[in-house]
Image (spheres, coloured by chain):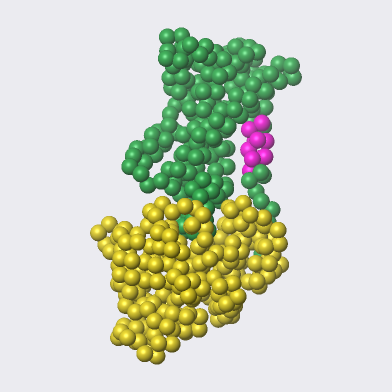
Chain colours: A green, B yellow
């Protein structure tokens, strides 16, 4: 069973981990910028991001499928039914979640903090970074929510990955397959494993975000 | 003393509302200038302009002889800092809060943080969570955070409002020593007549965004040139 599960579990974690990494690199700065900037069009970008958060993953899969299909604009990349396509789909799902929840987290900070940081001589990137670290509880929630949504997502990865054994089969698509074939025990075992892994990763991330402090007098 | 700041024809507006309109003001290097006046007089706005956090709508500010542009370089901004009425500390321990400005500048922390904490009477609290300190301790931590970066100008926006007399005395002592021993220019916004009298070399009265009088402290209180200054000196101004 280990030989069956291990490549599936590994691929699930790699695909979702890379997708979350890319979504974070794009989403944290955008979320922080949206919280700080006061520019025309900001409300439109916010509305687009919140819409993206509610986008059905299967529709994301469909759009990515069309873009990467042989007749699509990015067909030459040859990414359809590869892990690259699955990562792209998961980035599209996770990115608005990371950006939107990061903005909300920073918006929740004391507005006087920005002025104080600048008065202490922080550059714009330093202000942004400090606000992200100050809002770390909310930022971690953004990461956890985004990771949870993509590791457990099935529609998009099934469409663009194709559930090819040894190549694009991940835990969620394997659960669908085993259920269809009547292998309920295997499907349930995969489900339990997915749940346990998600719990462990979330627990580790939460612990990582905690700081040890000595009590005040 | 030479001029640290020169303000000429400085106006600041938010929308159509003019909140500050100063024909001329000089702040001298190494002096303690108290800015007094009722609420809404433009005192805090003036401090933001002096910390280069926003450019004036009109007029010219020079610092150390150099004209300040609308987007001043970071090196210039870092020569000045502000301690606000409400200390805004980071969600970190006291040591990391005080070290913050040094780390921003890429400077070594070494023993400087410990020395700054000792200077404000907070030795031993370096590992405490900053936001769990008492009000007076928080303000002293904010002061240590400002002093450790050795600013040329320290702007203070009612730094002792709402503090108990013990902490007021401590902070005033630290500020006076900083000015006397290091020559740091202090610009102190205060509602406290007695504090202005104790600390300042000169006092400036702002009223509805306009500068009514700037005078040596003794003259401001003993022979004010404007009835509004006299009212302030007698404590008759409603804040």
The quarter holding residue B211 reads: bottom left
**Percent position (x, y) of residue A54?**
43, 32
- Residue under the image location 43 percent in, 43 percent down: A34
Task: Say which of A57 and A82 sits in front.
Answer: A82
The quarter holding residue A184 reads: top right
Task: Say which of B187 and A170 sits in front.
Answer: B187
Task: Say which of B99 and B3 sits in front.
Answer: B3
- Residue under the image location 33 percent in, 66 percent down: B8
**Height in image: A52 above or below A104?**
above
**Height in image: B201 above or below A100?**
below
**Percent position (x, y) of residue B73?**
47, 52
Task: Say which of A175 and A115 sits in front.
Answer: A115
- For the view shown, which residue lies furthest in the top direction? A70
The prevailing secondary structure element of the residues shown in magenta is helix
**Percent position (x, y) of residue A210?**
65, 48
The quarter holding residue A143 reads: top right
Residue A64 in the figure: left or right of residue B135: left
Residue A204 colored in magenta in the image: yes
* Quarter of the rendering occupied by the C terminus of chain B: bottom left
Asked if one can make out residue A197 in the rendered structure from this viewpoint, the answer is: yes
Residue B93 colored in magenta in the image: no
- Residue under the image location 46 percent in, 68 percent down: B4
**Height in image: A157 above or below B32?**
above
**Percent position (x, y) of residue A90?**
52, 26
**Height in image: B152 above or below A162?**
below
- For the view shown, which residue lies furthest in the bottom direction? B222
Give the magenta range.
A197-206
Asked if one can make out residue B174 in the rendered structure from this viewpoint, the answer is: no
Counting the numbered discs, the total is 0
- Residue under the image location 51 percent in, 45 percent down: A125
Residue A17 in the figure: left or right of residue A30: right
């Amino acid at each position: 069973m280990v030989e069956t599960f291990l490549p599936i579990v590994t691929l699930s974690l790699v695909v979702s981990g890379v997708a979350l990494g890319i979504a974070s690199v794009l989403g944290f700065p955008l979320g922080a910028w949206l919280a700080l900037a006061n520019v025309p069009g900001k409300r439109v970008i916010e509305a687009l991001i919140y819409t993206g958060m509610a986008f059905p993953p299967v529709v994301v899969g469909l759009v990515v499928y069309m873009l990467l299909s042989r007749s699509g604009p990015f067909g030459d990349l040859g990414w359809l039914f590869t892990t690259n396509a699955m990562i792209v789909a998961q980035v599209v799902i996770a990115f608005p979640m990371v950006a939107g929840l990061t903005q909300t987290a920073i918006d929740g900070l004391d507005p006087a903090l920005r002025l104080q940081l600048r008065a202490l001589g922080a550059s714009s990137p330093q202000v942004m970074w400090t606000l992200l670290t100050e809002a770390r509880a909310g930022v971690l929630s953004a990461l956890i929510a985004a990771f949870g949504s993509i590791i457990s997502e099935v529609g998009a990865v099934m469409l663009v990955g194709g559930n090819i054994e040894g190549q694009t089969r991940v835990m969620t698509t394997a659960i669908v397959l085993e259920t269809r074939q009547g292998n309920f025990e295997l499907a349930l075992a995969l489900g339990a494993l997915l749940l346990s892994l998600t719990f462990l990763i979330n627990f580790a991330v939460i612990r990582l975000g905690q700081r040890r402090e000595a009590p005040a007098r | 003393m030479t001029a640290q700041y020169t303000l000429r024809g400085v106006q600041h507006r938010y929308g159509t509302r003019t909140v500050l309109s100063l024909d001329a003001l000089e702040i001298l290097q190494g002096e303690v200038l108290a800015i007094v006046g009722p609420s809404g007089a433009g005192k805090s706005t003036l401090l933001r302009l002096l910390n280069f956090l926003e450019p004036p709508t009109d007029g010219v500010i020079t610092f150390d002889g150099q004209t300040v542009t609308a987007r001043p370089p970071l090196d210039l901004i870092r020569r000045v800092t502000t301690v606000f009425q409400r200390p805004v500390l980071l969600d970190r321990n006291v040591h990391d809060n005080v070290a913050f400005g040094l780390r921003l500048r890429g400077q070594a922390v070494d023993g400087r943080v410990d020395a700054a904490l000792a200077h404000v009477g907070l030795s031993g609290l370096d590992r405490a969570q900053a936001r769990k300190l008492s009000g007076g301790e928080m303000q002293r931590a904010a002061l240590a955070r400002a002093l450790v970066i050795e600013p040329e100008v320290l702007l203070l926006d009612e730094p002792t409002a709402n503090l108990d007399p013990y902490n007021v005395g401590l902070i005033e002592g630290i500020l006076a020593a900083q000015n006397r021993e290091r020559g740091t220019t202090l610009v102190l916004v205060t509602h406290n007549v007695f504090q202005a009298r104790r600390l300042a070399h000169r006092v400036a009265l702002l009223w509805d965004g306009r500068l009514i009088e700037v005078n040596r402290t003794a003259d401001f209180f003993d022979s004010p040139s404007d009835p509004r200054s006299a009212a302030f000196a007698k404590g008759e101004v409603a804040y």
